Amino acid sequence: MATNDHVLFHIDEGVGVVTMNRPERLNAVNWDMGLRLVELFREIRFNDEVRVLVLTGAGRGFCAGGDAEWLSGSGDRPLPGLSDKSRVLPRYQRKTPAGPFAEFARTIIEADKPVIAAISGPAMGAGLAFALACDRRIGDSKARMCAAMVRLGFSPDCGITWLLPRVTNLSTALMMVETGKILEAEEAHRVGLLDELLPEGQALEAAMRYAKELAKGPSVAIDLARRCIYKSLTATFDEMLDYEGVAGTMSADTHDAREGTSAFVEKRKPVFKGH
């Protein structure tokens, strides 16, 4: 797998655990770390050993957002509008100014398998976008969430304006991107940014417990169901009936569908194999 010291990865009972590992910077993302995260998630998509993903951060934070050196325009990688080097942007960055920072949020959704965020400490800026792109967010009492871009004079990026109103609500989304207010754990839970709130230090354990239960399930059906939910965000009801029909036919041709129906008839617990 494509990892480095700033991105850690291991597999535990079908759950791939991805750890952003710059604890001295509260896991702020620099360019190389962003590239590694994108590459790793793309590889994991086609790794059938991994059925569910857990995304977390090392130390006292989930992810504090973009690295301050890059945001200042003083690093090796240009930031459009702030760096003298922006006139020589690589072709890739001209099409995606935020580079792998924004691309990683897209890649989380495109992983085509459930992704669970385990959050302790700050999830801010790009880090908030990464958390919002996950299927579920499990946090502890130290979690803090903020659309921090406006605090630095930037408009939101990394998909936050698409994700926020869908995860929380329109007025909360507008308040967050307009003020840059930091939401402490309890308020983040109240407005729906955190799906579960645990005592300090218990977020990763709870996320792993949930992920392992999913990993024991009929993975093809689960992944297709996830696709259907995302498809429904831009589809009509009639389109979704057709899409669900296709997904149902696809999942029917699996060991797990045969096992599930047999177990139901025989009044026993199914034993799914993920294929």
Image (tube, rainbow, N blue to C red):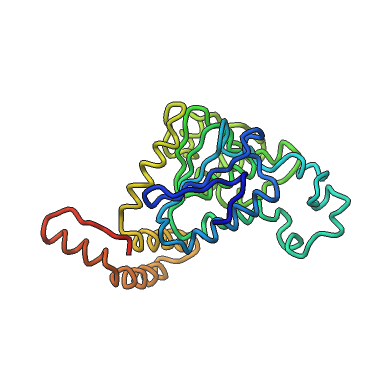
Which one is in front, 248 or 263? 263
Relative to 148, is 254 above or below?
Answer: below
Residue 175 seen by the camera = no
Say if residue 112 shows up in the picture.
yes
Question: In the image, what residue occupies the spot 46% across and 29% down?
Answer: 201
Q: Residue furthest left?
A: 266
Within the image, what quadrant is residue 20 found in? top right
To which quarter of the image does residue 99 belong? bottom right
Please tell me which residue is depicted at 63% across the width and 37% down the height of the picture: 64
Q: Is residue 206 above or below residue 105?
A: above
Which sits in the foreground, 109 or 161? 109
Report whether 266 appears left or right of 89.
Answer: left
* Residue 36 horizontal/vertical position (percent): 62, 53
Residue 238, percent across and down? Answer: 39, 70
At 58% from the left and 38% from the top, the residue drawn is 123
Quadrant occupied by the C terminus = bottom left
Q: Seen in the image, is 197 located left or right of residue 3? A: left
**Which of the 4 quarters of the picture holds residue 92?**
bottom right
**Vertical side of 56 occupied by 249: above or below:** below
How many numbered marks, from 0 up? Answer: 0
- Percent across and percent down for residue 91 are 77, 65
Task: Name the image quarter holding the N terminus.
Answer: bottom right
Residue 213: percent from left, percent from top:
32, 47
Q: Is residue 221 above or below residue 27?
A: below
